[in-house]
Image (cartoon, coloured by chain):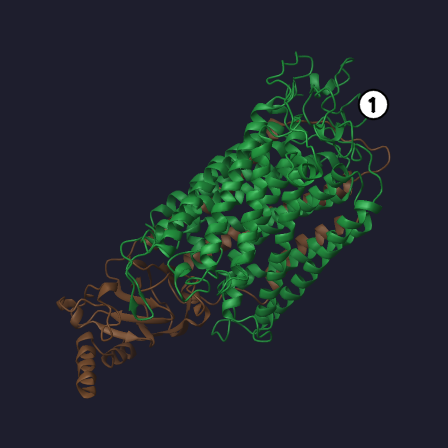
Chain colours: A green, B brown
Amino acid sequence: MVEIQSGIGTAIPPAETEDMELYHPKSWWTKYVFSQDAKIIAIQYSLTAIAIGLVALVLSWLMRLQLAFPGAFTFIDAERYYQFITMHGMIMVIYLLTALFLGGFGNYLIPLMIGARDMVFPYANMLSYWVYLLAVLVLAASFFAPGGPTGAGWTLYPPQAVLSGTPGGQDWGIILMLSSLILFIIGFTMGGLNYVVTVLQARTRGMTLMRMPLTIWGIFTATVMALLAFPALFVAAVMMLFDRVLGTSFFMPALVEMGTLLPHQGGSPLLFQHLFWFFGHPEVYIVALPAFGIVSDLISTHARKNIFGYRMMVWAIVIIGGLSFIVWAHHMYVSGMNPAFGFFFATTTLIIAVPTAIKVYNWVLTLWRGDIHLTLPMLFALAFIVTFVNGGLTGLFLGNVVVDVPLSDTMFVVAHFHMVMGIAPIMVIFGAIYHWYPKITGRMLNETMGQIHFWITFLGAYAIFFPMHYLGLMGVPRRYHEMGETIFNPPSAHMLNIFITVMALVVGAAQIVFLFNLAWSLRKGKPAGGNPWRATTLEWQTPQTPPVHGNWGKELPVVYRWAYDYSVPGAAEDFIPQNQPAPDRLSRGALA
Amino acid sequence: MAVVVVLVVLAVGSVLFHFFSPWWWTPIASNWGYIDDTIIITFWITGVVFVAVVLFMAYCVLRFRHRAGNRAAYEPENRKLEWWLATVTAIGVAAMLAPGLFVWNRFITVPDHATDVEVVGQQWLWSFRLPGSNGKLGTAATGSIAADNALGLNKNDPNSLDDIIIEGGELHLPVGKPVKVLLRSVDVLHNFYVPEFRAKMDMVPGMETYFWFTPTRTGTFEILCAELCGVGHPQMRGTVVVEEEADYQAWLQEQPTFSQLMASGEDVQTAEN
């Protein structure tokens, strides 16, 4: 045995900060609308993200309908198709996944899991949400603006993003998109600073960094990364806005558009790509790391077993976070950048596979000799491992520079990133909602509806994206609103497209069951009690469920052990909460 | 139990799909068989890992699912196992990376005797330029583009005058001869992509990019644009014909040079006046 949770028996360090003064709401408005309570802000963030995420879901239906039945829906012309893919991508990556993991789960879980009363800067936290909401509204407004939203693809590559051959390029679309991104980053920065400072400054007594649940490690590391990565996107957005509105040439070389020489000169389209991906690649892990952290806790809790290799898991998160800043140009192997870069970026990219694989091994080794309860959170966690391993492995194709050459810009890429940063993190989001809904509302989500939702979503999503890789391998490019006649494509490829579309419609429809469950269980769900999963972490030990303003009553909890004391030999129960002292030293394994 | 069955079916089904589905890459028509080989190596390594992980999970669920009275083991770490797994993973990764970098080195090292061929992209049309009798392409710039000079060639560069220009037509290439494809765009990003050649590269306004390959079999192939370039992106198609040297030379003789094009442009203007 190892001395990993040697905290037991050692003195509890004194509190690092005084108990904080909370802002106490004086009216309904300041309690539920302009709230400074992280739990309310978390719900506001989550509901907004889910609402705009539903728009993205409908957009994905529309584009799938076009791909399966080109021409059948006359309102989905080329312009609209490109607007749909652009808005779908940007909404999913930024406004749904980033906002939900950090603004939603981060806000709810950080103070509760580290034993704080609230975020350190509650007012800035509130502003963060309202600026985020504004960003979402600006984005949504582009649907109603003249010319509609931008159709530049979510990567917004100039020069096409600001030219007339692209929907919204010379209308309002691109301006609103860039403005919305700038607002999002401003809002995120206020929230993000809060999450980082709260984790560093407001942990309760005994909650050392190496006793934090992996959920917090994931969210914390992702937030640090986001604070470092988003400025690159901010700069790129501002410069492109100048190019579009003021006629500058940051990204615009001399070019002839439809026979007319434009007044731009000397700008570099590649510069934009470097800035975009300097943000864009860390962004993948900004979404993935919270998912890694959360899923670790779901697996551990529902397998009634400590997470295997906790220290390795923490270091893997930190190393992945660091490495993800030096791999960005693997998105640009065929961009025309100096090809010698390929050696460096392929090497760094494939090195990331090692800490990532360690995480996968440790998840499945946590299942080994566990006591696996096949609850909904556990089912979604298993689905996460399957889809993440699948998507991660295809990343080894695309990261390995020369293998990327034939596959780049094909449906293989689309299938890969949907599997790894779409489906996999969303499996975790669902698992997390089934897991923490009882804490947030005091009631369990309905099991039957949950099972229906799980099986359709998991199997359907796999059936959508696994075969899609082979379309790309065949040479079908991405971002084609219709393939048309080709020399190399067999007719059966179109059958596959129809199959994928049918699956997409079914999986999308299954989300209605989930939404209904969320609403129905709020009133009709089984009462959950304070700790229905018999979990160790602090959020399950609050005096009230749902936790009230200030979280902890009079006294902050004191932490005596790591977050994973499940099935400790000799203990009466198969879990020991983090705030339970060990007067009789019953936690033998932890001492040895 | 349903979970166990589904996991096993998923692992086995994915492998069966891989081997038996009709969807696979197009028969190769260039020297980049190395790339296909590297993909095959990658498929094997990643496929084994995927099946192993999913089947291991299935076994765990089967063997360790909750039954009354069960209790999980308590084992926080096992450093030996963790390092062993990390080492095996690193070896697997190296087994994919090493051949990958080896082939990449070939991919970016253009043979000295490769013939230059220029491809110019614009919304939404492919044009081509081949060196004339002196074997050299003349200089060109986006700023020089005019009605009678669609590719922006430098009229004062003697190397330009004999360049052969194909606007919107087919590109022909002789089989078995290495080609350095020089890529230029006059407006937005494009990407010159022929699935059978395996290679592709972006075309970026303001700079010249390149890749090289050797066509290895004759035939007619489709050029696709693989970088989103506006609403006409999927319609931006072209054709490349790979043929025997004699056929190629015959075709080449029929193509206009830059100076011929300029002369005919003046004729048209004179006629209009």
Q: Find residue B228 and report its image quarter.
A: bottom left
- Taking the image as shown, residue A73 lies to the left or right of residue B242, namely right
Taking the image as shown, residue A513 lies to the left or right of residue A2, namely right
Q: Is residue B35 left or right of residue B137?
A: right
Q: Nearer the viewer, residue A185 or B137?
A: A185
Residue sitting farthest toward the front: A27
Vertical relation: B148 (above or below) A107: below
Q: What residue did someone put label 1 on?
A: A572
**Most foreground residue, B104 or A72:** A72
Residue A330's spot in the image, x, y percent?
43, 48
For residue A9, above or below residue A192: above
Residue A376 x, y percent position in the rendering: 76, 45
Which SS class for mark 1? loop
Which residue is rendered at x = 77% and y = 54% of the image?
A: A452
Q: Residue furthest bottom?
A: B271
Chain assignment, label 1? A
The spot of residue A147 in percent (x, y) is: 48, 65
Q: Residue at x 25, y 79 (%)?
A: B255
